[in-house]
Amino acid sequence: MDLKNKIAIVTGAGKGIGRVTALALAKEGANVTLASRTMPDLQSLAKEIGNVGRKALPIVADMSRENDIKKMINETVSKFGGIDILVNNAGLGRFGRVESLTTQDWDEMFEVNMRGLFLSTREALPHLKRKPESFVINVASLAGKNAFEGGGGYAATKWGVLAFSKCLMLEERKAGVHVLAICPGSVATHFQHPGASKPDSEKVLQPEDVAQTIIAAIKLPQRAMVSEIDIRPTNP
């Protein structure tokens, strides 16, 4: 896909992987809807996107709220005329042993990491399918493949993201919708589970590494679709 003048939505765009991915899409020529719960973060990113000559639509949206998600989709279509790319990046982690994990912690993770991802995808699909080629990018995690102590809730959500992505790919590939689940390992962001060893800042993945991998997958010829990518530090 040539990204010039394409329309992208990035959830969790205020920080980390989401922020860098949104900016990378803009630098490739896309106009971007930026969604997160904190407007100041979105406004500063929108300014950066404006500086590279593209348009940005910042929207305060909580991915646990269905009405917020519907508003995000509807305002994007109203402003830009459609959707070509959906990047489901928003996510949160609550870590602890199963015996100490609260019901609220469990529910919050599934509401954002799974339910929110499902809702944003469902609401975007009719618009994505109007395009000859479109993309759903689901930011999963290597935690969806590798168990660790204290990750019973978080890892379960990311396993779910992988299963959801595989089913969606099979359902929508004939409609021209490419579905990619990307599974980063340790990334230098604010997001890190307690008990993990402190990463070496020179060896750990950077958000830009994940963003550029997403861009590369989108820019493959239309006949080719990468459905799942693991990305990890070369020598942690």
Image: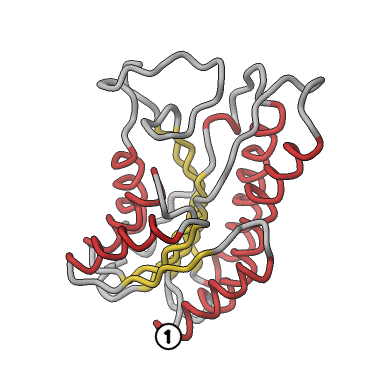
SS of the residue under disc 1: loop
Q: Is residue 16 left or right of residue 168?
A: left
When asked about the image quadrant of residue 109, the answer is top right
Image point (73%, 37%), residue name: 105
Q: Say above or below: 64 vs 97.
A: below
**Which residue carries the number 1 mark?**
81
Residue lying furthest left: 52
Residue lying furthest front: 40
Image point (33%, 70%), residue name: 56
Counting from the top left corner in percent of width and height, residue 137 is at 48, 55
Q: How is the image coloured?
A: secondary structure
Counting from the top left corner in percent of width and height, residue 226 is at 43, 49
Mark 1 surroundings within 10 Å by alpha-carbon count, few (fewer than 14), some (14 through 19), many (20 or more)? few
> In the picture, which quadrant includes the N terminus?
bottom left
When asked about the image quadrant of residue 63, the answer is bottom right
When asked about the image quadrant of residue 173, the answer is bottom right
Counting from the top left corner in percent of width and height, residue 83 is at 45, 75
> In the picture, which quadrant includes the C terminus?
top left
Q: Amino acid at mark 1?
A: Gly
Q: Say above or below: 41 vs 127.
A: above
Q: Say above or below: 89 vs 231.
A: below
Q: Is residue 144 left or right of residue 213?
A: right
Counting from the top left corner in percent of width and height, residue 207 is at 34, 40
Image point (52%, 55%), residue name: 88
Q: Is residue 134 left or right of residue 26?
A: right
Image point (51%, 47%), residue name: 181
